[in-house]
Image (tube, rainbow, N blue to C red):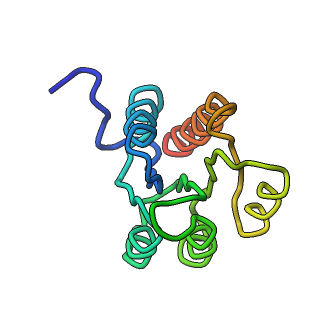
């Protein structure tokens, strides 16, 4: 086993809704290598994400959702995630993070909205904070 492989008992678990394979693969690798996080899986479109959300996932701590997907929209996924997984942190990562879109996402239940082109470091810092808090909580 690779010494840098993510632990199966990571402090934080995540599900990713992203249709761009390059972004998805790079994000998964970065999250798992740099943070105490395990990515449970991904969906590339709204139907796949809604199907995943309809299953029982008590261990999912974080959902990272793109707005524009191969089919459907991340806005509907965000709305469903608020209803089906209210305890999970919901983050939007999009190239379309305009002020209006940010406000709309927050109104639909997003905790944070990050711009893919300018705020990836902020996303990693946010996720790192969640992972650190989960680690501290697990120790107490």
Which quadrant does the N terminus fall into? top left
Which quadrant does the C terminus fall into? top right
Residue at 46% over, 26% down? 34
Q: Residue furthest front?
A: 70
Q: Quadrant of residue 36?
A: top left
Residue at 44% over, 65% down? 45
Task: Give the vertical position of 15 relative to 31 (above or below).
Answer: below
Task: Give the vertical position of 1 relative to 67 (above or below).
Answer: above
Pick the residue in front: 82 or 36: 82
Q: Number of marks in the image?
A: 0
Pick the residue in front: 30 or 129: 30
Q: Quadrant of residue 111?
A: bottom right
Q: Residue furthest left?
A: 1
Residue at 64% over, 31% down? 125
Residue at 45% over, 42% down? 11
Task: Give the vertical position of 34 relative to 116 (above or below).
Answer: above
Apparent side of residue 32 relative to residue 62 in the rendered image (left or right): left
Residue 112 at what x, y percent from top left? 71, 50
Residue 22 at what x, y percent from top left? 40, 37
Pick the residue in front: 5 or 11: 5
Residue 119 at what x, y percent from top left? 68, 33
């Amino acid at each position: 086993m690779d010494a840098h492989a993510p632990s199966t008992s990571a402090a934080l678990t995540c599900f990713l809704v992203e249709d761009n394979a390059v972004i998805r693969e790079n994000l998964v690798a970065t999250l798992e290598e740099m943070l105490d996080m395990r990515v449970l899986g991904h969906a590339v479109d709204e139907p796949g994400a809604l199907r995943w959300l309809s299953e029982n996932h008590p261990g999912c701590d974080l959902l990272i959702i793109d707005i524009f997907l191969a089919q459907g929209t991340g806005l509907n996924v965000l709305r469903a995630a608020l209803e089906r997984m209210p305890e999970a942190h919901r983050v939007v990562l999009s190239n379309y993070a305009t002020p209006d879109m940010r406000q709309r996402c927050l109104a639909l239940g997003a905790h944070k909205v990050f711009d893919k082109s300018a705020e990836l470091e902020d996303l990693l810092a946010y996720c790192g904070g969640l992972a650190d808090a989960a680690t501290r909580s697990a120790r107490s």
